[in-house]
Image (cartoon, rainbow, N blue to C red):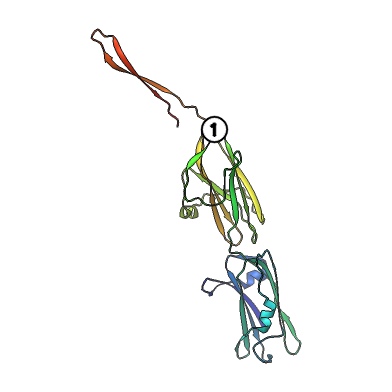
Amino acid sequence: VMQVSYYTVDSNGNNVEDITDEVKAGRVYRNQTIRSEITINEHNFMLGNSVEGMDVQVRVARNTADIADYHNLAQTSSWESNGDIRKLSYTFTLDGEYVQSVTYTDLSGRVVSDREAQFNVDKTQPNGQIRIAQHEGWSWSSLLSAVTFGLFDQNSVTVNMNADDYTSPLQEIEYARFPQMKTLDQLEEYNGWSSDGNSAAEFEKASSYGVETNEQFIAYEKLTDYAGNVRYISSNGVVLDNTQPAPKITITNLSQASNGSQNGYQMHLLLPDN
């Protein structure tokens, strides 16, 4: 009898969540290391702790680094033994799109296969950008730690957003704008994000929205991939203003002669701009 189980693993190497049923039913995305554990209950086991009859096949895509030789690992590693129970565990730590199949052939030639497992390990945040369409150079790709309202336009503008992720598809692009800067903690607590409703499983996405004139704002973008990695991006402060300043003239009497005639005046010219 053979059993293959799968778990997510925390930073201390402990099993966190049993995802065995999920990875065998369809593709699973996690931003954690995934551990595979093979257990064999076999009385007539081969000599030693190695298992030459064990065939582990792993296909990987969307990876940027070479992965381990899991086939060789399963055949040559030291298996834990407890009576008729033999167990081997190994981890998938690198980002990638994995498919694993496990087959065991015992000494009599009987073959048992486990259902294929599909999972993505993705510990990397998606990338993205905010850009003001009407102004070349008004673009940002990170969450700014300081903001100044130094970008001005008299007209309405279009805020363009894009996103990409190499290992996992993207959720909807979410966005918001505020008249003042938000901290990361405030953004994580905020639940009023807008989106264009594009929930298709895509590795690249784009969206946009318009902002009418006579508004001061900072644009924010929230990107989430299928593995749960989140990135926040913000623009610098933008001021849209097409209101003409309205001058106000005030004349103040400086002095008055004894016969009632005016000897002097002071003029104040105010040019308010809201």
Task: Answer with left or right where residue 242 lies relative to residue 45.
Answer: left
Q: Of all residues shown, which one is farthest toward the left? A: 258
Q: Quadrant of the N terminus?
A: bottom right
Q: Which residue is mark 1?
A: 154
Q: Of all residues shown, which one is farthest toward the right? A: 109
* Picture residue at 43% right of the left edge, 26% below the top: 271
Q: Indicate whether 108 appears above or below 179.
A: below
Residue placed most toward the observer, 81 or 4: 81
Tally the numbered discs.
Answer: 1
Task: Answer with left or right where residue 118 lies relative to residue 269.
Answer: right
Can you give x and y, in whole percent of width and height, for residue 224 in the image? 58, 56
Q: Indicate whether 247 appears above or below 60.
A: above
In the picture, residue 209 is in which quadrant? Answer: top right
Name the secondary structure under disc 1: loop
Can you give x and y, in whole percent of width and height, for residue 159 in the image? 59, 43
Residue placed most toward the observer, 220 or 39: 220
Can you give x and y, in whole percent of width and height, for residue 122 in the image? 61, 64
* Picture residue at 47% right of the left edge, 51% below the top: 145
Q: Quadrant of the C terminus?
A: top left
What amino acid is at disc 1? Gln
In the picture, residue 225 is in which quadrant? Answer: bottom right
Q: Indicate whether 9 appears above or below 104.
A: above
Q: Indicate whether 238 appears above or below 54.
A: above
Can you give x and y, in whole percent of width and height, for residue 91 in the image? 61, 74
Task: Answer with left or right where residue 2 lies relative to residue 254.
Answer: right
- Mark 1: give few (<14), some (14-19) or many (20+) Cα within 10 Å: few
